[in-house]
Image (spheres, grey):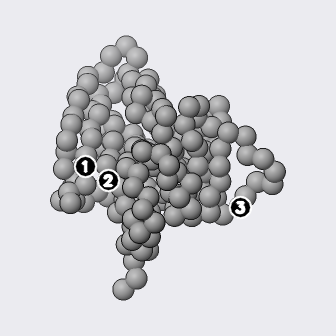
């Protein structure tokens, strides 16, 4: 049986694209990641964590995720937007790709590639990712976008930092890094 993710992984490695691919997401306990194309919470610590991890790297995202960015392309990172329809003319500060494979090839000279969403892009890249950086937001939220189920038998937790709510961050949260079990 043909499985697209297996084909993508084979093609990605065959082309000697040896970048580390990491999924990065903020995920609620009920796996919510978005509502009406926005985060359902505001955690400044998570935004700072995201910036620290991704600056200087390549980012791959879906079109709706890109459109949700309040100030357009994220600075000091190569922004790749997946889309089946391309803008005419010049794309200011980002590149477009029509497939995950093309997006990864555009990032092949980067040591680190981060997959930053949305839900469909996470599902398509779960098998090729080497790492996951998940901010677990310890609450349940009403949402219309959810992170895909994680098969934890395929992932090993390699680091965790737990935090309690404070004056800036209203919810308890954890920064957890996972490495794919080889």
Q: Which residue is mark 2?
A: 130
Question: Residue visible at 44% across and 58% down?
Answer: 17
Tell me which label, 3 or 2, sits earlier in the chain: 3
Report the Cα–Cα distance between label 2 and label 1. Answer: 6 Å
Numbered mark located on residue 85 in the image:
3
| Foreground: disc 3 or disc 1 | 1
Does residue 158 lie above or below 164 as drawn?
A: below
Q: Is residue 36 visible?
A: no
The quarter in which the C terminus is drawn is bottom left
Q: Say whether marks 2 and 1 touch (CB < 8 Å).
A: yes
Does residue 161 lie above or below 29 as drawn?
A: above
Total numbered labels placed on residues in the image: 3
Question: Residue visible at 37% across and 13% down?
Answer: 167
Helix, strand, or loop for circle 3?
loop
Mark 1 neighbour density, 10 Å: few (under 14) some (14–19) many (20 or more): some
Q: Residue furthest bottom?
A: 1
Q: Which residue is mark 1?
A: 179
Question: Which residue is at the front of the view, 57 or 140?
Answer: 57
Picture coordinates of residue 159 (x, y %)? 21, 37
Helix, strand, or loop for circle 1?
strand
């Amino acid at each position: 049986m043909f499985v697209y993710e297996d084909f993508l992984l084979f093609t990605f490695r065959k082309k000697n694209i040896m970048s580390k691919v990491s999924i990065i997401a903020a995920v609620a306990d009920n796996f919510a990641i978005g509502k009406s194309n926005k985060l359902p919470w505001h955690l400044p610590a998570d935004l700072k964590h995201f910036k620290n991890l991704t600056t200087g790297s390549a980012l791959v995202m879906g079109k709706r995720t890109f459109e949700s960015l309040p100030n357009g392309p994220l600075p000091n990172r190569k922004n790749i937007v997946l889309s089946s329809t391309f803008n005419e003319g010049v794309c200011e500060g980002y590149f477009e790709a029509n497939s995950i494979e093309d997006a990864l090839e555009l990032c092949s000279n980067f040591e680190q590639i981060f997959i930053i969403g949305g839900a469909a892009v996470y599902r398509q890249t779960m098998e090729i990712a080497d790492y996951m950086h998940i901010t677990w937001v310890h609450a349940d939220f009403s949402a219309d976008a959810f992170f895909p189920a994680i098969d934890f038998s395929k992932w090993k937790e390699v680091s965790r930092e737990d935090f309690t709510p404070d004056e800036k961050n209203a919810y308890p949260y954890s920064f957890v890094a996972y490495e794919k079990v080889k």
